Image (spheres, helix red, strand yellow):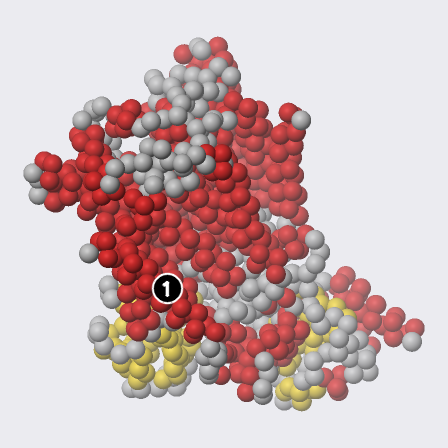
Amino acid sequence: MLPTLGHVAVVIALAASVFALGAFLVGGRGGDPRLLASARRAVYASFALALLACAAMVVSLLTHDLSVLYVARNNATSTPPFFSFISLWAALEGSILFWALLASGWAVLVLHRYRSRHPVLMPWVGATLAAIDSFFFAVLTWPGNPFLRVTPVATEGSGPNALLQNHPFMGLHPPLLYLGYTGMAVPFAFAVAALVTGRLDEGWLAVVRRWTMIPWIFLTLGITAGAWWSYEVLGWGGYWAWDPVENAALLPWLTATAFVHSSMVAERRGSLKAWTVSLVIATFMLTLVGTFLTRSGVVASVHSFTQSAIGPWFLGAITVALTAALGLLVWRLPSLTGTGRPSSLVSRESAFLLNNVLLCGLTFAVLFGTLLPLVVGATGSGTISVGAPWFNRVNVPIFGALLFLMGVGPALPWGRASWSSVRERFGLPVLAAVIVVVAAWALGIHGPASLATLGLAIFAAGIMLDEVIRGARARARGRREDPATATWRLATRNRRRYGGYLVHAGVLVMAVAVAISSGLSSQTSATLRPGESVRLAGYLLTYDRLVVGPLAADPRVTDARAELTYSGSQSGTLGTALRDYPNSTTAIATPSVQSALGEDLYVTLLAYDSATRVVTVRVFVNPLVSWIWVGGAIVAAGSIFAIWPERRRVPVEAVEAERLPLPEANPSAEGA
Amino acid sequence: MRRLALPIAAAALVALLALIAVTARGPAQPQTRAEAGAAIAAELRCPDCQSLSVADSHTPSAVEIRRQIDTLLSGGASPDAVRQHFVDRYGEWILLAPRSPLAWALPFLAILVGAVLLLAWLRPWQRAEPVAVEQPAAPDAELRRVRDEAEALDA
Amino acid sequence: MRNLRWLLVPIVVVPLTLLLFHGFGRDPREVPSPLIGKPAPSFSLVALDGAKVTGEGLRGRPYVLNFWASWCVPACVDEQPVLIEAARRYGSQVQIVGVLYNDSPDAAHAFLDRYGDGGWPQLTDTGGRLAVEYGVTGPPESYFVDAAGIVRAKQFGPLTLAAMDQRFGALLSARANR
């Protein structure tokens, strides 16, 4: 009954989305407000129906309704409720259902918020979002129907993918990532609307930047949480393997980051419109391509979903969306060429634009590396792999150059700078960077990539700190405030810049943590009898005993847990397990991670012999890894600070813009 | 202090770069066999896992490959010969870093093209006229800029 | 000249679509073997029944090395009746040799008891040495070797009767022609 209800909800949601699409198109043309209102209500209805379908699926999972194929494949009667619940997004069809829910949720949010604003743009925004929703509901109706039934009904299901039911983080990082992916449809919809109507003015840019930042924050958190998940679950002591799934999340993040930077130049100069729109389109297209790659079985990946009939649908959608968006862009190109070039090569604009070149270069490198095996396969010249060694060696220099720009950019004023007024600011930061690099060398970090990253990060941090202190000092002197108050007031009155600094600070924290943890981590593996010990990096680990038995939460799972006592800069006891899932060919390692701000002690059980009680463990001591997650949180906090609504007052930009000698007015591209 | 920082920093940076250049030019660090083996293992794909290297994996194949690397190295094989040994069995697929120079160069070529396009758009050569509006003494101008901005923000 | 910009759309869309389309129906894990046309790696291993089997001893008639594991479900389970039927069909013209891939003898015995034992030798490949020699990426995977000891084909994934007929047919007719 319930699965039928879910399926019916999906079909009606499809109908509602298609109706909304048509109504937005017709209503937008004729300007009929009642038609537009009913189009909006159809989108609201499709969201409610998607919610209903998700609820039906969740109840089916929680009650282990094995007559539903998706449940039979991804659930077992003994699956704990939490993992039953998150199975909604742990496999192909369910994840698309969840995706549709989030996509229609974003659509509701945007259409409701701007229901009485942007009357020219909104019908097109609505039509684009409704078209995207229609696609997802159509996939759910035909090739990816999550409510398919099976007869005869099995008495037991195969249970969730063992890797995905091993850690509660599975409840966190997919929703965050999906919120990021689906949210990128909103700026794309605004881009389409602006191209169709020819209204790429400053108001458009402000809306799009805000609606890019919001999913960008989710993407940032999702990527960080995903890295944390793989660190806690996969048991090899690392957090980023350049797996296609990871790359799929990184690609739109990179182009969205490039957009946020170039949009600031576009706003000041009234130019670069075609470029910023291209980045918005690229970001959305990359979310689609990434989804396609990881869901079609075209590339091999840690947790790619199984090969399915959904692939051709996604490929069709990619082709249609890309053709339409590019076609619109090319059509509008003549009216998008602004003339507002930066007046000097040494200026913040130039730094931002070079940053765009590098971010796009990074995007290209990651996409190229991900697709290269496919390209080589297509040309029939064998099968190759592109893995971490290639990605690290190619991307670290590009990332280093970005760190350098991150330092130089804020030191350069908008417009025109004279080199002599800027260069003295580099003295102290460069000095600090050199000292830190020498100290790091002395501490044992000898990898050139780690040292360079460290030095550039310190350089960038130094310049940023200097900038903040200068601002606070000037204000404190002028207004007789204490430095803390002055900094806070300056920051809250100029959220975008100071939020940006905080985001940069988070990236720098991550860069330093990655550089140091990869440069100083140590590892060993040891085969131990009960009572024997292993030493690593100041830690002494003693193997106490082996406990083998069914897992309390899921008795079908055999849990073999080695218990160890450890002492060093942290001390206590830990248990690290190998779990045998009935549906998994190999035992799944459950590493034990003892995290501290200074370093992590990371112990994986590799093998055990239940007769002799001999175990083989792999031990890592990874310094500063926790700071990578902290850095991600700082990035998110900084971006939230940046987009926090300001009190209504005279817009800063207007005041600043008046003072800047702009070479020309900003001609809006209306009426083209 | 500030005035002195720049020359000192420049000198320190030059010294550091010179030091790196000297170390890089000197004889390669004597690597132990274990280190050399680990470096090779990190560049071989673990045959029966996804996206992990032989160094990061503990499947029987990965363990066996690590053992063979060690045996080959102790027999005097060069790292390239060790890699080729596994390419002969698994194909180029086993290498996590492709050997084709184009695969390495293309991302940097793309950035170069991007930078050239950017430069072409900025056209610095078209405004070669000397900067007429030179600001007054640098520190004052700098301080004024910051103060102006701070005031503008409060306006 | 003005309309040249429209070329941008197909220049971007067509290659991307073709590339992604090309990926369909291909298993990215399927890796062609560089051993084809080369002499089969030599080995000397002990079978589950205690007999010693060597690569040289197998020469003289075509053989297939079938890497499998009891935990490889359902592919290896599906494959077992195919192998049994092929063994019956080809009799002593060819030799089938099973190689345990990352598996224990006990589990292998249990598997054979349950899904049928064709009676051909099942080699215990301790440490996966032979699997690495052949470049195996995961069970089931099979290598067809001709009478002269040259590797002629690799089958990725479960064998089918059609595949076995085709491979063995080619090997046997090549031998008859000589």
Who is closer to the viewer here, B149 or A371? Answer: B149
Q: Image quadrant of residue A606?
A: bottom left
> Residue A514, relative to residue B124: is it above or below?
below
Residue A501 place in picture, x, y as percent? 28, 45
Pick whichever, A510 or C169, lies toward us.
A510
Instruction: Residue at 37% x, 52% y: name it.
Output: A403
Element on which disc 1 rests: helix
Q: Is residue A90 above or below residue C98?
A: above
Tally the marks: 1
Q: Chain of mark 1?
A: B
Quick one: A91 or C90, which is closer to the camera?
A91
Relative to the observer, which residue lies in front, B111 or A331? Answer: B111
Whole-percent x and y of residue A140? 51, 37
Q: Amino acid at mark 1?
A: Val
Give the answer, above or below, for where C95 lies relative to A294.
below
Q: Is residue A146 above or below residue C53?
A: above
Residue A343 x/y as whole percent: 41, 33
Direction from residue A388 to residue B98 in the image, left or right: right
Decide if residue A357 is on the left or right side of residue A488: right
For label 1, the residue is B14
The N terminus of chain A - image quarter:
top left
Residue at 52% of width from left, 33% of height from top?
Answer: A135
| Residue at 81 percent of width and 79 percent of height | C147
Label 1 crowd bin: few (<14), some (14–19), many (20+), radius 10 Å: few
Q: Is residue A127 visible?
A: no
Residue A392, position in %: x, y? Answer: 47, 61
Residue name at image x 31 percent, y 82 percent: A535
Q: Inspect this view and state whether residue A32 appears.
A: yes
Residue closest to the far right: C177
Q: Quadrant of residue A267?
A: top left
